[in-house]
Image (cartoon, rainbow, N blue to C red):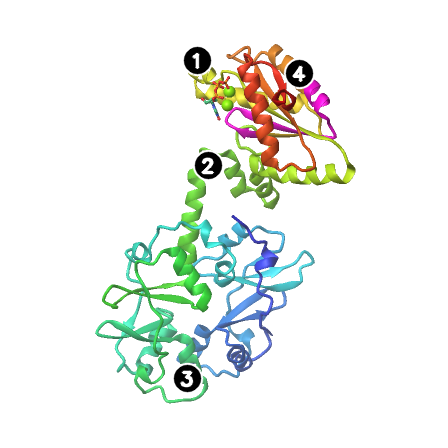
Amino acid sequence: MRFPSISEITTTSVIQVPVSASVETALSLMLESNHRSIIVNDETCYRVFSATDILGMIEKGLALSIPLNKLTLPKVPIIKTNMNILDTLDYLNNSVEQCCVLDENDTFLGIITHTDIISNIDPDTLIENYRLRDFLKLGKRMKWTTKDVIIANLIPDMTKGSFDNLIIVEEMRPIGIFTTKDVMKLIQSGKNTNVPISAYMSTPVDVIHEDTSIKSALEFIREKHYKRIITVDDNNQLVGTIAQKELITLAYSSWTKLMKDYQSKLIEINDLLKHKKDEYASLAFTDSLTGLYNRHKFIELFHSSFRLMQQRQNSLSTILIDIDHFKKVNDSFGHNVGDNTLSKIAEFLLEKLRETDIICRWGGEEFLVLLPATNIEQAQNIAEKLRRKLEQTSFEKVKTLSASFGIAAVTNSDTLEDVINRADHALYLAKHNGRNCVKTQLNLL
Ligand code: GH3
Ligand code: MG
Ligand code: MG
């Protein structure tokens, strides 16, 4: 899962006009750049002027030559580049489509819209088995009409903002679409609006089946740069439309729910939702129960240590540790005590080993330690000390514990798999030898 930063997803090619400019200027800039809205630079804030505002003015009979500062335009929320993408979602709701992004010096960088989020969030993070059909059941979210309806009769409703697009159907099959942007173009060009909608609708229209998953739907609109999806059933009949922003809201609420379900099990996921980027990184490489490195991180660290070993011609060793009879701990005291004991063992290892040693929870009650600049004899001494100290440590409820240790030295021709196999074999010998002892790969010879 990857979280993009605010500056990574900011759209920087944004058109702006000063608040003193006329509506006409704003309109021609919008048409030139094919944008439905424009950022208005007011002295102390940013506002937005959109296609719907223009339609509203025409409806009220206002002249397009008036300056923007004569209109009451909504302020756009401001976010900073150091904010988190999750915070941005709090701003982007049904009434706010964009945020202005300022950098740490309060310089205007651009805007973030639903489109930016949609084209940057990995759809894999969203649930996959949600279908558009499930969403459409929540209510009819569409306006449709037949192709003979006269455009002029539709303008009052469109300017009221009751809908921003119309699907044109024939026997309920979508044949075209007509949006506020189309009305805006018509008005600007001074063309007669007393004509049937079929004269200016966009046709044919791309439709997708209502059984499509949310994931595929997101990919579809991302690829095609559509603002909305038109869904049909098996007979190609119109089922409903979903706006891009509704889709992202749905996807995000599912995603957030998923995270919340996790919370009860993993405290780190809780942190993930609350804190900033740094925490995301540590989550990816630590084991949730013990806080030690996880397997994934260990493998990464092994490779960098391996390179260093080759460069410096140092030695490098590993110790594989498996707690003896750990099943009995669970059986006698319960799984919670078992878990707690594993955390205490992790603390024990962190305390007894050197800062430079890399300690990982390799699996259930197995720990793997990588010892830089350590040869096999030194590793054996370290393991022997650990073994003795562990034997002498008293754990809450469980009291005494022991572990078996398998040691392998890393050679220049090794892969990680070779090393683990040797350590594992040495560990097997230790278990076979009655447990609570240290064996090295030499015993294999
Ligand atoms: P030995 O290694 O000495 O042969 O005996 P063992 O009882 O430790 O056996 P084994 O290593 O095969 O099994 C490990 C047991 O550790 C299995 C499971 O009950 C327990 N275990 C593994 N992971 C966890 C965990 O995360 N929490 C708890 N509580 N127990 C775990
Ligand atoms: Mg085991
Ligand atoms: Mg064991």
Q: Are marks 2 and 1 in contact (CB under 8 Å)?
A: no
Q: CA distance from mark 2 to mark 4?
A: 39 Å
Where's residue 236, x and y in %?
26, 68
Where's residue 178, x and y in %?
36, 76
Of discs 4 and 3, which sits in the foreground? 4
The residue beneath circle 2 is 263
- Quick one: which residue is furthest to the front in this view? 445
Reading the chain from its start, which is encountered first: label 2 or label 4? 2
Reading the chain from its start, which is encountered first: label 4 or label 3? 3
The residue beneath circle 1 is 332
The residue beneath circle 4 is 384
Look at the numbered disc 2 and give the secondary structure of its residue: helix
Q: Are marks 4 and 3 in contact (CB under 8 Å)?
A: no
Mark 3, ligand 1, within 8 Å: the answer is no
Reading the chain from its start, which is encountered first: label 2 or label 3? 3
Q: CA distance from mark 3 to mark 1?
A: 80 Å
Reading the chain from its start, which is encountered first: label 2 or label 1? 2
Find the magenta span and give its range. 361-382
Task: Assign the C terminus to one quadrant of the image.
Answer: top right
The residue beneath circle 3 is 186
Let me know if residue 96 appears in the view.
yes
- Which amino acid type is shown beneath numbered disc 3? Leu
Residue at point 49%, 52% (across, down): 90
